[in-house]
Amino acid sequence: MSISLPPANENTSNSLQPTGWLRFISFSLDHKVIGLQYLVCGFLFYLIGGVLAGAIRIELLSPISDFLARDVYNQVLTLHGTIMIFLWIVPVVNGAFGNYLIPFYVGARDMAFPRLNAVAFWMIPPAGLMLITSYFINGAAQSGWTAYPPLSITTPAAGQIVWIVSVLLLGGSSIFGGINFIATILKLRRPGLKLMQLPMYCWAMLGTSILVVLSTPVLAGTLILLSFDIVAHTGFFNPALGGNVIVYQHLFWFYSHPAVYIMVLPAFGLVSEILPVHCRKPLFGYTTMVYSIMGIVVLGLVVWAHHMFTSGTPPWMRLFFTIATSFIAVPTGIKFFNWVATLWGGRISLNSAILFSCGFIVNFVLGGITGVALAQVPFDIHVHDTYFVVAHFHYIVYGGSVFVIFSSIYHWYPKFTGKMLDEKLGIIHFALTFIGFNLCFAPQHWLGLNGMPRRVAEYDPQFTLVNQISSVGALLMAISTLPFLWNILYSFIKGEKAGNNPWQALTPEWLTTSPPPVENWPGEAPLVTKPYGYGANHSNENNPPITQA
Amino acid sequence: MTTLPSTKEKSEELTSSDHQHSDHRLFGLITFLVADGMTFAGFFAAYLTYKSVNPLLPDAIYELELPLPTLNTILLLVSSATFHKAGKSLEAANSKQCQRWLLITAGLGIAFLISQMVEYFTLPFGLTDNLYASTFYALTGFHGLHVTLGSIMILIVWWQARSPGGRITNVNNFPLEAAEIYWHFVDGIWVILFIILYLL
Amino acid sequence: MLQKTAIYTISISLLIIVGGVWAVDNLNLLPVVASSNAPIYDELFKVLFVIGIILFVGITGLVIYSLIRFRKKPGQFGDGIAIEDNLPLEIFWTAVPAIVVLFVGLYSYDIYERMGGMQSLSTSSHDHHSINSEEKVWGGIGLTSQKLIGESSLPKINVDVTALQFAFLFNYPEGEIVSGELHVPRGHPVTLKMESKDVIHAFWVPEFRLKQDVIPGQPTVINFTPTKNGRYPIICAELCGPYHGGMRSTVVVEEPEEYQEWFKQNSKQPGMEL
């Protein structure tokens, strides 16, 4: 609706907002600034979560509890899970890339509600800092990121309450973000741009935001009830007072299973943007991709009880959730076959972005296969709550989402900063991450099958060697962060100039300067009806080749 | 800084009509209410599960008195109608009448809250007596919080409509429209709550 | 050309399948089989493993092959081929996973049925001394179908399990025994009725391939028939507090005679027979 806007006058648009780097620590309303705020903030929390993961892996070098005090170990694993999920993956795949890219993709100058957007971001740092500070003051929560009662009611209350408050804040931030994305994608589209012409990431974010809006409030309500149990001694989830612990699990997983899709659907969308550019080919099967996203959204809402197969759920419920969960493999499979078909016959530049994307495909396929296995009740009864599950979900969220985050950083860094990242360092980063990750988590499948439960500080000595291998993998993952950090910082200062469109990409964020101006395009928003119009025998009438500025 | 209008909003006002502008704000509000509704849905689901799998011992079962909650239901339903009237009056550019209906609606909302309080103080059980008592207070309390917020919103809208040349006119009726949708939502939740908690 | 591709595809697929079957048979992926439903579990595992290996190696192979074959060589410019979709192909790879998933679902349902998972627990535990029909029992796993056990109609062993931070207590009501170790005779069906004193725990014996949460306020039941003598770990699998990792016990599967001996020595009611 604002496309007929005359080019924004630099002086007036910046007069009320700080300029330069100050923008990034201010209450900026610019979606690109907010996106980068999410990204940097998320990455800092990732480093903290990584240190915690390192502490866990050091503890597990030996079969006895010797590195951390037992209750501290439980605090560390609780913080690790909470930080990685709520402060790193969810804010980055949704908030960071969503805020940066969605307005470009729909042809808008900003999100639908810029102020709400900034509020949503600024809820995150205090929530995260509160969570981490609780560790140093009274001890953090120690009942795992699932906070199952009655454990969460009987462990020290102070840490648990801080945990609840900060997850409520993060959930609120996520809901505000979700509302913003739905409104932006459906209501702020540039005239002439049809839904089925949107880049795939828009569809992924639409699906994700629907899940956020429908499921996060249930978690919020549940945590409010849990906090009553802790503070006011009500008995919702306290069996000693007549409550029912299974009800908590149902309500919790009604959010927390969709949360997995909240973490991976945007990653699916990002990969769908990255592959065509570096393969110089259209995204294969656009229509089926869209339907499969919506299929995952619908199915994703009705599979939660597969986390509760050993909780005493009735047989009919186990059967229903087995079938529903298994069928998620179908739309997910479609996406993977479509990506492979996108690679097929392309002219692939073997750069860091494509390597991380392909690493994602390989890791996620393994995570998906173990996921289908875990959906089968008889299989799950043996491996539930073991290291098999730990391996499975790290293949989904790290091998899946985090690989995509790195891929996306390599792909969009030139747009964010106007500088290229160093490819050699990128490939070292990829090799270290990929080897380290698989070395760390692949052996954990075996540990789970053979009798190592999750969330333990001590274990059967027969598992020592495999745990040490796993810890070596974790060390490699930690080391892999160094070339990445160096690359990011060094390239920012001394990197090769990227130009506006170093990848010769067709999606709208590349049809402006790098970094883009405050209102995204100096002139009118371009109408991109074929975001994936690559290919040898395509006449790019809609998308004339871009002249480098 | 937040009180200053951003240039972005200024420039949008230049190019897009106010109607278009309010359009996606209403859309956002409705999306938010869907989310809010899911919180209630979670509470209702918990309550119904407790009811079916955690039956109370016979001596702990109590009967809720119906007259007061029925009065509450009528209060809220009538207030929905009066709010609708207020909206219609504003559309007809009758600001005085609109303000009157708004005041009546807010009055009904506050009457509901008072009546709810009376019920709380006359009930034979407290928050932590048993599972049902806790769920009862959690559900009605969370709804009461919504009514409180709604009543405050109505009073703010009334205040804005009152001042001459104020922010709410038949051209810019977004605050009133938003408050009205929210109020209908809260009333709808009450009807479901009344059926599930008192009648079932 | 097409023929050649087909031959390659078929031979590679066969190789993957054979490799998968070999791996699952020869790699030490699962612990000892010690209960009547563990072999059924291993059967399911084998099927899932082979299907998984085929999919994983297949897709990974395709990705690596594409990256190598279609990589941009120095001096090459321009785009790849512009294929946007291919409906028959997309229908094919929607249908194949759907069929595989349907097969896996039905098969695992069958496995579950054979493990006794679909049995209504109120009937399977009806004759249990302490569970009257009015008491609500929450979930668990039923007895393996009798025909699979072989030596059927052996008397059932009933044990009450109490889980608390951070130990399991096993109470044999017939002999008034309270033990920290679970002793069970080989071949006899065992029913555990479990309840927690504080938080949620889980009873897990990897060698039995069985796990059941132990929930405060809600008794749960688990049935199994041990088939191999030995000492196996009982592991708490649900985070239950600081000493969760140390919450372990042992199940001793022994010959019925040895079990009798142990039972007599520990029982406060001499003369009780199986």
Image (cartoon, coloured by chain):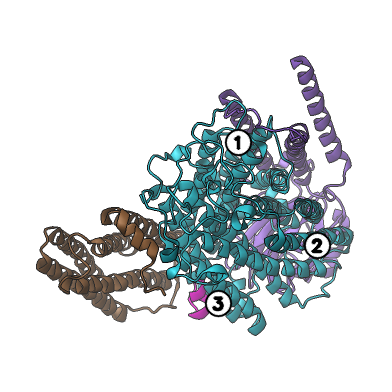
Chain colours: A cyan, B brown, C purple
Q: Nearer the viewer, residue C46 or A134?
A: A134
Q: Can residue A238 be seen?
A: no
On the image, the x and y values in percent for residue A408 come to: 64, 51
Local crowd at mark 2 within 10 Å, few (<14), some, or many (≥20)? some
**Mark 1 vs mark 2, CA separation in Å:** 35 Å
The crowding category of the residue bearing disc 3, from other C-alpha atoms within 10 Å (few below 14, some 14 to 19, many at least 20), is many
Marks 3/1 same chain: yes
Estimate the x, y position of residue C135 in percent, counting from the top left: 55, 61
Which residues are the magenta region? A226-235
Residue B128's spot in the image, x, y percent? 44, 78
Give the numbered dot on residue A161. Answer: 3
- Residue C50 lies, with reference to residue C131, above or below; the image says above
Q: CA distance from mark 3 to mark 1?
A: 42 Å
Pick whichever of labels 2 and 3 is earlier in the sequence: 3
Q: Which chain is disc 3 placed on?
A: A
Give percent across and percent down for residue A180: 44, 57
Pointer 1 or 2: first along the chain: 1
Q: Main secondary structure of the magenta part?
A: helix
Horizontally, residue A402 falls left or right of residue A437, namely left
Whether marks 1 and 2 lie on the same chain: yes
Tell me the chain of label 2: A
Residue drawn at (72%, 42%) of the image: C146
Q: Residue at x 72, y 77 (%)?
A: A72
Disc 1 packing (10 Å; few <14; some 14–19; many ≥20) = many
Which residue is at the front of the view, C83 or A155? C83
- Tell me which amino acid carries mark 2: Ile
Residue mark closest to the camera, 1 vs 2: 2
Q: Identify residue for label 2.
A: A479
Closer to the eye: label 3 or 1 = 1
Residue A529 included in the magenta stretch of the image: no
Q: Tell me: residue A278, above or below residue C220.
A: above
Question: Residue A334: which disc?
Answer: 1
